[in-house]
Image: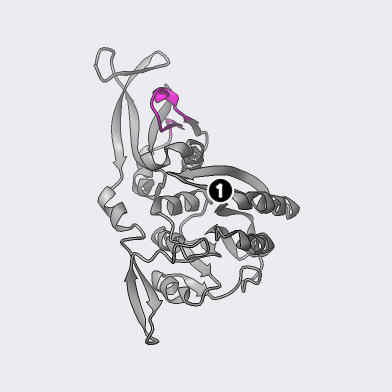
Amino acid sequence: MNVNILIFRIRKSRLKARELALKEVEAFLNDIPGVEVVIGGPLSTEKGIVAAYLPKSFDIDLLAPAYHKLGYIDSVYIMLPEKKGSKKNIKWKGDFYSLHQVYEEDKELTRNQAPDKRTFLLPDKTGGLRYVTGYRGNGTDTGKRALPIEDCKFMLNISNINPGQRVLDVFAGAGGIVYVAVQFGLDVYSTDIDEEMQYGLRNLGSKHYVVDVINLPFDNNFFDSIVTEAPFDIKSTTSIVNGLGEMKRVLKTGGYIVLMVANYQTEKIRERAVELGLTLFIDMPLDRKGTSVHIFKMKKN
C-alpha cells in the first residue's frame, strides 16, 4: 500500500459520538495534505474505530508529541505490513498487517485533571479568596459548570486553532475550556457575567473580563477562534442568540466558533447563524454518556 494507516480508538464514554470523533481526527490531521479519515476502515467490525490513511511520504512520528491533545480518542495504533500466517494478522484489501500501539492515554493523569479533582479560586464570606476543590457550580442549568476534559480537548481541536493563537471562551464559567486551552499553549481570553468567576479564571491563566456576551470589549477580528459551552437554561437562549453577532465581530475572517448548547436551544441559534452568514461545518447532537447536547462549528467567511 502507498499509505500509512493509523487507527484511532474512541473512548468508551463517547462511543455514541462516532461522527464527532471523526471530525476531531480530521481536524487533528488537518495540516497534512492527502489524508483520508473514515469510520471503521480495516477494523470496521469493531465499535469505536476511526481510521486515517496518510501519505507514505509523511513522517508519522511527528504526530507523537500531540496525541495527548485528543479528547474523544484514548489510544492510537499503526498498521504495519506482515507476512501471511500470523494469528494476529489483519487482512485488508488483500494484504496482511499487524497492529502496533503508538499512544495510550495516561488515565491517571486525565483523572487528576478532571473538574472534581481541580481547584478553583473563589471569594469567601470574609471578603477574601479560597481554593475550592472540585467546584462544579450549583448544579442548576445556569450554574457554572466545568466541562469534562475530553469535551474541552475535543472542542478546541475542532476549532482548528494552533499554539500561540488567540482563543476566547465567552461563557467561561468554572473554566474547563480555559484550563485545557492554557495547557495547549494558546493565548487565552475569557468572559463571564458572574463577577465571582473572575478570580478562578485569571488564576487558571486567562485574560478575563466581567462582561455580558452582547457587549464584548474586544476589537473587530481579534480572535482566531471562539470555543464555549453556553448556559443550558432556556432563559439564556436569547443572550446566546444575541451574542452570536458579537462573537462574529471579534472573530477573524476564516476563524471558527465552536459552541456547545442544550438541544432545545439549537433551532434559534441555527437560525441566527444563517442570518449572520456564518457557515455551519458541524451541526450535530452529542450524547455525553446520558447527557444530550448539541455541537455547532461555524465559520466566519
Q: What's the magenta region?
A: 39-57
- Residue lying farthest right? 275
Asked if 67 appears above or below 52 in the picture, the reply is below
Residue 184 in picture, x, y percent from top left: 41, 58
- Residue lying farthest bottom? 126
In this picture the colour scheme is one colour
Q: Nearer the viewer, residue 248 or 112?
A: 112
Q: Is mark 1 on a helix, strand or loop?
A: strand
**Which residue is rendered at x = 47% and y = 75% of the image?**
198
Q: Badge 1: how crowded within 10 Å, few (<14), some, or many (20+)? A: many
**Magenta stretch holds residue 149:** no
The number of numbered badges drawn on the structure is 1
Tell me the quarter of the picture where residue 181 sits: bottom left
| Residue 186 left/right relative to 277 | left
Q: Nearer the viewer, residue 60 or 89?
A: 89
**Which residue is rendered at x = 55% and y = 58% of the image?**
232
Q: Can residue 31 be seen in this view?
A: no
Asked if 204 appears above or below 75 in the picture, the reply is below
Tell me the quarter of the picture where residue 109 sits: bottom left
Residue 209 in picture, x, y percent from top left: 54, 75
Residue 34 in picture, x, y percent from top left: 52, 33
Asked if 230 appears above or below 1 in the picture, the reply is below
**Which amino acid lies under the numbered mark 1 shown in the image of this protein?**
Ile
Q: Can residue 275 be seen in this view?
A: yes
Q: Which of 57 and 164 is in front in this view?
A: 164
Asked if 255 appears above or below 169 in the picture, the reply is above
Residue that mark 1 sits on: 295
Q: In which quarter of the image is the N terminus?
A: top left
Residue 189 in picture, x, y percent from top left: 51, 68
